[in-house]
Every structure is written in structure tokens, then in C-alpha cells.
Image: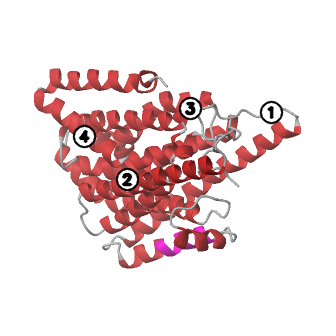
Amino acid sequence: MHILRIFGWSFAVTAVVVAGAGVIGGGQAAALVAILAVLEISLSFDNAVINATILGRMSAAWQRIFLTVGVLIAVFGMRLIFPIVVVALTAHLSPYDVFDLAVNHSDQYADKLHAAHPAIAAFGGIFLFMIFLDFMFDNERDVQWLRWLEEPLRKAGALDVIPVVLGLVALLVVGEWFSGGHTEQVFVAGVAGLATYLAVSGLGEFFESRGLGAEEDDGDEPATAGTGGASSTALATGKAAFFLFLYLEVLDASFSFDGVVGAFAISQNIFIIAAGLGIGAMYIRSLTVFLVRQGTLSEYVFLEHGAHYAIGALAVILAVSIENDVPEIVTGLIGVAFIGLALLTSIRHRRKNADQDGNSDESSAPEPVGASS
């Protein structure tokens, strides 16, 4: 595994962008870009873990697209253009007027972006909550972290409609009692978030199943994960990979909302914000590919669980933030706590399995931790 092959562009862009910020805006601008990059990375590590579980289902070509085209979408689309579009829609202004505010009247732009926060939180919150629910009610998942909680939910997952019902109930509760006077805005954005999740994830699964089924019917062997991956699971290509790619981009948007809004506490210059958060987004993408190619999720089997619990917590935080200010440090620490606990229990589980395999048959190599039975 060559670290530079995966993180090389991230290192190079960091050096160029921070140096450029220093030349244009001085030492303070360079420092702000660096601080925002660190903030984005610290807040989005769970995003990388979730991304890795999805990217691991995609072919090597689509993984490269995720690292190239996906980075451009993340940096310019999600961190610069998308907030402008959101403000334009919620403030009933043209994108040009909003861009003019962002460049020439950054304080007014920050106020309007803050005013759009209920819609942002509702859209991103329901999208992330649906990811959490689908994971918890996945009745085909063999590996469990908190068995006392996950086993009953796994069994209940035999009824496919449960996550959608619970998502709608959660939206009704938030819109009715925790919307802070923005009920209509929360409901509209929440329904849009739910519809987006169902459309993108559903289409991805549909084309993935059709593509793999067609390969089997033709008698061809589907592409499989490399030796560094978790298994020999067939990899998605074509339309299936395209919709998984879209799913990853919407997921990235849901994670980035909170960071974009919170970044205005550090700087109100949209170019500094885009530069800092964009650097962070590149590292998250590089880390995602590293996790996939290193096979980390197959070795540390509870990391995926910890990331999904962190996502569930972030969805709740977004709902709470509609009416109350939630410090960024709280969001970051909760995510780090779940990932850290999951990593520690994964290491202990791996050592226990290795000891058991060694005692039972010293001559045979142990099976991968978390392999399906």
C-alpha cells in the first residue's frame, strides 16, 4: 500500500492552497484555511467509514471517478455552489444576487444561510436518519456490535417498510414540536430529504441487482474486490455504480451542511471557507479509498457499526439544532467517541478470534474476522 498514491493529491493541494491563501490574504488567511481543513476532517471521519462501505461495492474505475470528479463536486459543488443555491431558494433571491452577497456582503450572506438552517437540518437530518435506520433494521447483517439492541431490530427488519415509517414519524415529531416556528419549512425539506434518499438508494440497489443478475445469466464472472478488500463480493459497474456514486454525493452533502454553516463562526469569506472545507473533503475521500483498498472494514468489523451510530447521533443533533445552537465540538466529539469505541472493540474481537483459531487449529490460517456464516 503506497500512501502517496492515495493521499498524494491531498498533500499537494493542501500545500498549494494554503500557500496561495498566504500569498493572497496573508498569514491569517492561510491559518484559517488550515483550521477549517482540520475541522472538516475531524467532523467527517465517520463519513469516510460509511463511504468506504459503499465504495467497496464499486469497481476500480468508479473508485477513481469518486477520487477525481467526486472531489470537484465536493469542493466546488457542495462547499461553494450548493450553499448559494440553498440560500437562493429559501430567501427567494436569484443565485447571482446571493453570490453578490457572499462576495461583497458576507455578513448578510451568513445571516441568510443561518436562516436557511432549519431546511438544511431537516433535509440532511432525515437523509442521515434513514441511513441509520436501514442499517439497524438490515435483517441480513450477521455481525452485531450491541447485540441486545441490534438483534431485535434485525429481526423486525423482515418488514421492509419499518425504516420509512419510523423516518416519517420522526419527521412529524420534529416538525410539530422541535421546528422552532419553522414547521412548513421543516416538513417540506424533510420530505425532500426522505424522497431523495429513497430514490437514489433504491435506484442504486435496483440497477446493482439487475447488473449482477445479467452477468450471471451470461455466464460471465462479475468483477470482484481485490485482495486488499473485504471479500470477493461482486462490484457494481454501469448504472448501478452511477447511482451509488450519486448516493455518495448526497451523503457527502448531508455531512457537509453542518460544517458549512459552522464555518462562518471562523471566517465569513466564502472562498476561505470553500478552500478549507475543500481540503478536508479531499482527505476524507483519500481516507475512504485507503479504507477500501486496505480492507480495514473487514479487519475491524465494528467500525461500520460505530460510524452508523455516529450518523444516528448526527441526525438527532441536526434536529435539535433547528431550535437550539449545538457547538461544533459536541458534534465532532460524539462522532469520534463512537468510532473510537468501535475501533477498540474491533481490536479486542480480532485478537479473541485469532487466539481461538490458533488454539483450535494452529496449522490452519484463521478466517477473516466478521466473515458471513
Q: Is residue 169 rendered magenta in the image?
A: yes
Identify the residue shown where x is 55% and y is 55%: 196
Image quadrant where residue 271 sits:
top left
Identify the residue shown where x is 58% and y is 33%: 228
- Residue denoted by label 3: 63
The answer to whether residue 80 of the structure is visible from this angle is: yes
Decide: marks 4, 3 in contact (CB < 8 A)?
no
Label 3: state its secondary structure. Answer: helix
Image quadrant where residue 312 sits:
bottom left
Identify the residue shown where x is 22% and y is 22%: 20
- Residue denoted by label 4: 36
Label 2: state its secondary structure. Answer: helix
Q: Which residues are magenta?
A: 162-170
Kindly report which numbered mark, 2 or 4, lies closer to the viewer in this rendering: 2
- Residue denoted by label 2: 340
Kindly report which numbered mark, 1 or 2, lies closer to the viewer in this rendering: 2
Which numbered tag is attached to residue 221? 1
Residue closer to the observer: 234 or 198: 234
> CA–CA distance between discs 3 and 1?
20 Å
The answer to whether residue 100 of the structure is visible from this angle is: no
Q: Quadrant of the C terminus?
A: bottom right
Quick check: 184 left or right of 296? left
> CA–CA distance between discs 3 and 2?
26 Å
Identify the residue shown where x is 61% and y is 54%: 199
Category of crowding for the residue at label 3, using alpha-carbon neighbours closer than 10 angstroms: few (below 14), some (14–19), many (at least 20): many
